[in-house]
Amino acid sequence: MIRGVFVSLLLLQFFLCQSQNVQILLGPEEIGENQAWTITITVNNDRLRSYDNFPDIEGFHKRGTSSSSQTSIVNGQMSSSQSIIMTYVPTKQGIVNVPPFKMKVNDQLYNVNGRRVKVGPPVQSQQNDPFRSFFDRDPAEDFFNRGTPEFVDIKEEAQLALTVSSDEVYVGEGFTATLSFLVAENNRAPMQFYDLGKQLAEILKKIKPANCWEENFNIESIEGEPLTINGKNYTQYKIYQATFYPLNSQPVVFPSVGLEMIKFKVAKNPSFFGQNRQEDYKTFYSKPRTVKVKQLPPHPLRDQVAVGEYKLQEKLAGSELETGQSVVYDFNIFGEGNISAIEKPKTENNSSFDFYEPNVKQSINRDNGRVTGTKSFSYFMIPKEPGTFALKDYFKWVFFNPKTRKYDTLQSEQVVNVIGESQKNQAIESNDLGSFYDRTDATDNQLKSMATTNWTKITINILIGLLLVASAYLVFKK
């Protein structure tokens, strides 16, 4: 009688839980130091499309996530559930306070109450004792877990895939490579990631091409995203994603790489309280990929131009300037491509303007498999001559557009009117160093003997002779 009531309560709780669409269930209130504690998200009769990161809990370490799905038919009606389980392991014995937290599941926010978890000494696995008394038995264990479970290996519907956004690009043109683990919607084999950080470091050593500039999307948390391939629904777990820009025309080769996953064998006759799965390992391998790289069409600047889709945004304080007064002009290039490789437009000083080295600022956005951004060049310029000037004569930037397969030029559309006096004369005066320096420019720089006259030589010789006579007189007198 007691056993029947107990089973009825369990079944009632089970069907009440099934009636709810989304559940977030916490693990037990007491575990051993060698046991795991879990938080489980379950979606009934719907797909688990998205969910927030599981909380960090002081006193627990995250060990990883696993997923499972189930379909059942009761009285001719089909029901299904999909679960994501985060496993925590305790760091020491004691009381662990799990604070209340919020999680967003399928774009809906749920409040989860906290819990105090007592972590006790390690639990010894109990052996079957045929001499246990009836009162020491667990009726649920007797009912649901009879004998040693038998585990079977279920064929998985999953694969490790390395995909590229394009199979052929130009030198300097970007393409995005994504390494992801794909799990089909009808997969019934429970799996979870294993030591992903260490594995990923080794994988990236193999697949990062040496002849490319890399823009890494820096995936910090791996979350499932729905994806449809050839009419089949998958959940995609992106492991690594980056956009590469070939630096030369050598093909970009991505070799096959392997990812080891934890794959669980499931009990042939599952029970509510028995062990329903057994941990095992399987390595999944991606297929090698090659991206062909083409040279840019002939052009005098072919080895210097940037490649991408770019536009110009310019900024000038006003269209009327005054000679001798500095003004700031911003030449902003924005669009999709290798923003870091954009070089400044070339300008040269002339009789009408002085241009100074620009201040450079760039911003790069990596999102949805695309790299976009802006590179800004802020120039100080001083007009020296009055008149009307089109700045396109001074500011031009050439690039190659891979979509149109043509070279294009971004040039200023600003036309300025310069007023004031000419600065040419002032420039000449500021450079006048005086008549002495003017004579040095006009003087021959060849070495010549000093110019002297004959009477100078005669005078010097007479003085030398008198000195010799006086010296002789003094000597002979002594």
Image: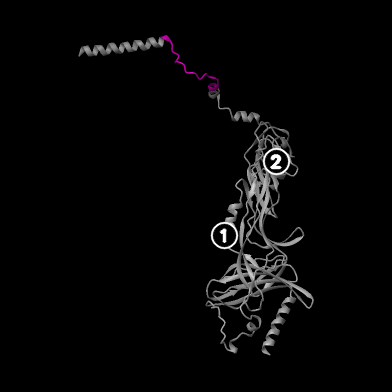
Please determine whether, in this image, residue 143 is positioned above or below residue 106: below
Residue closest to the far left: 478
- Amino acid type, label 2: Phe
Q: Nearer the viewer, residue 419 or 85?
A: 85
Could you tell me which residue is drawn at 73 percent across and 79 percent down?
15
Magenta span of residues = 439-454
Could you tell me which residue is drawn at 54 percent across and 24 percent down?
437
**What is the x, y in percent for residue 264?**
63, 69
Q: Nearer the viewer, residue 435 or 411?
A: 411
Could you tell me which residue is drawn at 58 percent across and 87 percent down?
136
Please determine whether, in this image, residue 306 is positioned above or below residue 255: above
**What is the x, y in percent for residue 24?**
68, 73
Q: Is residue 465 visible?
A: yes
User: Which quarter of the rendering shows the C terminus?
Assistant: top left
Instruction: Tell me the CA gap for discs 1 and 2.
Output: 41 Å
Query: Which residue is denoted by mark 1 in the rendering?
Result: 198
Binning the other alpha carbons within 10 Å of mark 1 as few (below 14), some (14 to 19) or many (20 upward) gives few
Q: Nearer the viewer, residue 443 or 435?
A: 443
**What is the x, y in percent for residue 38?**
62, 72
User: Which quarter of the rendering shows the N terminus?
Assistant: bottom right
**Mark 1 falls on what kind of element?**
helix
Binning the other alpha carbons within 10 Å of mark 2 as few (below 14), some (14 to 19) or many (20 upward) gives many
Query: Which residue is denoted by mark 2 in the rendering?
Result: 399
